[in-house]
Amino acid sequence: MINAKISKIEKIAASVAKISFIAEDGSALPSFTPGAHVDVKVNEDITRQYSLCGSARDINEYSIAVLRDSHSRGGSVAIHDTFREGMAVQISAPKNLFPLGEHDGKVILVAGGIGITPLISMMKSLDDLEKQYLLLYVHKPAQQIPFDKELAAGVNTGKVILIPSESREKTAKRLRELIPAFEDGYGLYTCGPDGFMSKVNEIAREKSWPDFALNQEKFSHDISTTGADSAFTMHLVQSNIHINVSTEQTALEALDEAGIEVDASCEQGICGTCVLRVLDGKVDHRDAWLTDAEKSANDRFTPCCSRALTPSLSIDL
């Protein structure tokens, strides 16, 4: 983790705070690419992931935007209530699970709500590269729009179109009007609530967009199940330890209870921080990190959410 401090907190909408970090010792921060995020240690119990919204050219300061959400798992509320300018915090080096690819044609950026955050960084990069793009931002009407200053120039040139979310039907109709038919070299990037992203991709597929050109960022993951949870045993091969995982706990919780420390962050199967190598046994994959091909290989395992389809898993620990 990087020892940092909060250099600035700016309210950019009624419930959205833009928080900027610099290195505590004044040194440059690691470089990042558009779409990247950092882990933020909110307190001793909570670490959360937030997309970087600044320019990738700026390695002296990182910025994130945090929506205060009383229905979240507590991280956003704690940040709004406890973070102050000058406060020391720990953040990770940037990670990118939502990279902006190289495109010869137009890039379509579609954001819903706080999902605008990583697309701001992408927009800035595309401007720097003088690439063609169109940013469609669905926002709550009659409220201050986050990043209104950053978006203003694009609104004036037609590169940014703001869409007030009056109703799901009207929003879908407007997106159908604005998302173009696919052409070679095009790329589409969407970020927002899961239902919103599913609708964006559905509309894109109606317009002949292939799956390889569709990219999305996830805030959360609805952990899928293949049936009732079963207890299983983990055999830690290197240390020759057997750990029982009950139906009431995750494998990560069982490891922690046994005093085995495994790096973890999101605990939802999104970030890939806790991935372990599987030597034997069949995994019940419930994560959104591994690809279908990687899941079929059956040689990796996310203990924060995945389980076993066999009575035991042998793990390289």
Image (spheres, helix red, strand yellow):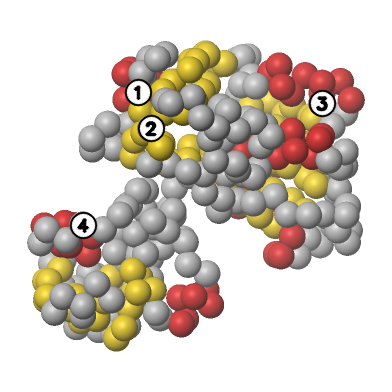
| Residue of label 2 | 3
Q: In the image, which is nearer the foreground, mark 1 or mark 3?
A: 1
Residue holding disc 3: 154
What's the residue at 37%, 48% (across, down)? 266
Badge 1 vs badge 2, beta-carbon distance below 8 Å = yes
Query: Looking at the image, which residue is at 38% across and 41% down?
Result: 1
Question: Toward the viewer: 3 or 287?
Answer: 3
Residue position for label 1: 88
Question: x, y percentage for residue 155?
Answer: 82, 23
The mark nearer the N terminus, 4 or 1, is 1
* Relative horizontal placement of residue 218, taking residue 104 as reference (left or right): left
- Which quarter of the figure has residue 61? top right
Residue 269, above or below 122: below
Depth check, mark 4 against mark 2: the one in front is 2
Circle 1 residues within 10 Å: few <14, some 14–19, many ≥20: some
Cα distance in 3D space between marks 4 and 1? 25 Å
